[in-house]
Amino acid sequence: MSRTADLVLRNARIHTVDPDLPEAEALAVLDGRIAWLGADSDAAAWVGPDTTVLDGAGRRVLPGFIDAHNHVRLGSDDACVQLAGVRTLAGIHERIGSWLAANPDAEWIEAEAFDYSAIPDGRMPRASDLDPVTGDVPAFVLSYDVHTAWLNSAALKRFEITRDSDILPFGRVDKDEHTGEPTGFIKDFAVRGLSRDGHRALRELGLPWASADRQYGRLVKSLDDAIRFGITTVVEPQNSLDDLALYTRARHEGRLRSRIVAALFHPRGTTAAELDEFAEAARAYADDRLRVGPLKLYIDDVVEPRTAALLEPYSGCRHHRGETFYPAEEFADLLAELDGRGFQCFVHATGDRGIRTVLDAVQHARATNGERDARHQVVHVECLDPADVSRFAELGVVACMQPRHCAPEIAGPGQDWAENVGEERWHKAWPMRSLFEAGAVLAFSSDWNVAEMDPMVGLYTALTRASLAGGPSWIPSETVDVETAIHGYTMGSAYANFLEAERGSLTVGKVADFVVLSRDILSVVPADILGTVCEIVAVGGSVVHSA
């Protein structure tokens, strides 16, 4: 050994997520990488006069978390009325009314995170539900999953949405089946409204939420949260080329403390010229702090408004199964084309038919182009037919999943997800253990701001499938153990993004991204995982957060 370390962490309980050296007591960092791991008694040899020494005080240390699907750019907006946790229409009225009373000169009412279950009788929301509290001020309200938007009558007028409107740059207009008039409910917002064209259209229409400054504010707030939660790598799954300037600005201003992988959105109709631009962006943004490259696609939507694609009709319906955004053969040809060009694809799929369509497309791509280490991802995997479980490992497809989404207070009995799917299909819901036991790679994530960003919430739910308040588990046969859950948030997500040689475990030669926790989450009861905080967060061996 010719040099002493830049940083030494001692007196710790290090869970490395490396099977060759599962546990250690100390580590040394040199030039941003792990130079040594071992016994605490040997750490002194790495300490010199300029070495920063951290005392782990016997605390648990893990690799930095890698959140494989985190919408930091979308984020949560402090300027919006916050509707999270409101479960009645009256409660929505109260929140909006209170905000409007405090902001009487507001030109827009913008709100986020409305829950579908808050609308009575299991129906979707209408402009007339908002009008009594919003009056003539246009209102723009996003669902908690950001897949739909809800407008009042004033916003319909401002956006010039009429009975003749159908497909908008930012969504699909829902219409009253009797009158043909727009209801105020906008479907496919995640596919259209979050696209390059959709955002531009909303900006041109004067919606403050879509402005560049508001986008940047959401991004840096989310980045601050990410590093506080120990998320040292964020995979931002849906960006346009326009959005890359936001990350460049954050990096220049010192706000980009987590590493970023930014996927580019590939909506239907993306041209060959745009694919060339995507490939050029991947070459231009290719360092260890900001990497661009994967493509994000959708095959279906979401279960709650019955827009996910199911193999059998929705509960209570004779025929309605939802739709895929592409015919199966067209999607298979598209994926083969993208695979042939070397792109990795993240495909949003929630319904069992949507997921099967993606797996069939990957199989077709392999038959067309030959087998390669593509690591295409099915993102969400909410309702998976048992016949397709083994195909993930067979086809090399990663299951990018968000454990929190399967919590009973979000998706379980009495909630729209469970009621729309029907009890006879509940065994298909988020089959994490089945996929793991079948050899699939699990990449865990938060899907912020659809759910809480904190990995402790995701880990707890993966272990329990219970609500945050405790109580009975929903489908406990599909829970996983704590080591598997941690692997999903570290090495699983690293592998899913071709990062396993550099990140995901604490291994000599890898970057020194690690967290020191306030509790030993490997030994406490699952309920005590909640509330655990990252007391120290290091990226590249530099402490970027301390509690």
Image: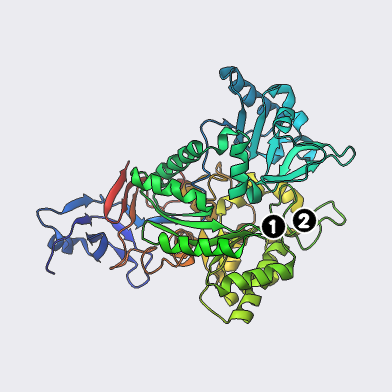
Residue kind at label 1, given as amino acid type: Asp
Q: Is residue 152 above or below residue 104?
A: below
Q: State the residue at coordinates (36%, 60%).
A: 288
Q: Which residue is mark 1?
A: 300
Mark 1 in CB contact with mark 2 (< 8 angstroms) = yes
Q: Secondary structure at mark 2?
A: loop
In the displayed image of the protein, which residue is found farthest to the right?
A: 178
Q: Earlier in the sequence, mark 1 or mark 2?
A: 1
Question: In the visual, does 180 lie left or right of 362?
Answer: right
Q: State the residue at coordinates (58%, 38%).
A: 203
The quadrant of the picture occupied by the C terminus is top left
Q: State the residue at coordinates (65%, 51%).
A: 191
Circle 1 crowding by C-alpha within 10 Å: few under 14, some 14–19, many from 20: many
Circle 2 crowding by C-alpha within 10 Å: few under 14, some 14–19, many from 20: many
* Front residue of this view, candidates 191 and 203: 203
Residue kind at label 2, given as amino acid type: Gly
* Alpha carbons under labels 1 and 2: distance apart: 8 Å
* Front residue of this view, candidates 507 and 521: 507
Residue 83 in view: no
Q: Position of residue 307 (x, y in %)?
A: 74, 52
Q: Position of residue 481 (x, y in %)?
A: 50, 61
Q: Position of residue 228 (x, y in %)?
A: 38, 44
Q: Is residue 340 above or below residue 383?
A: below
The quadrant holding residue 202 is top right
The quadrant holding residue 273 is bottom right
Q: Which residue is mark 2?
A: 322
Q: State the residue at coordinates (61%, 31%).
A: 110
Q: Secondary structure at mark 1?
A: loop
Residue 231 in view: yes
The quadrant of the picture occupied by the N terminus is bottom left
Mark drawn on residue 418: none
The quadrant holding residue 124 is top right
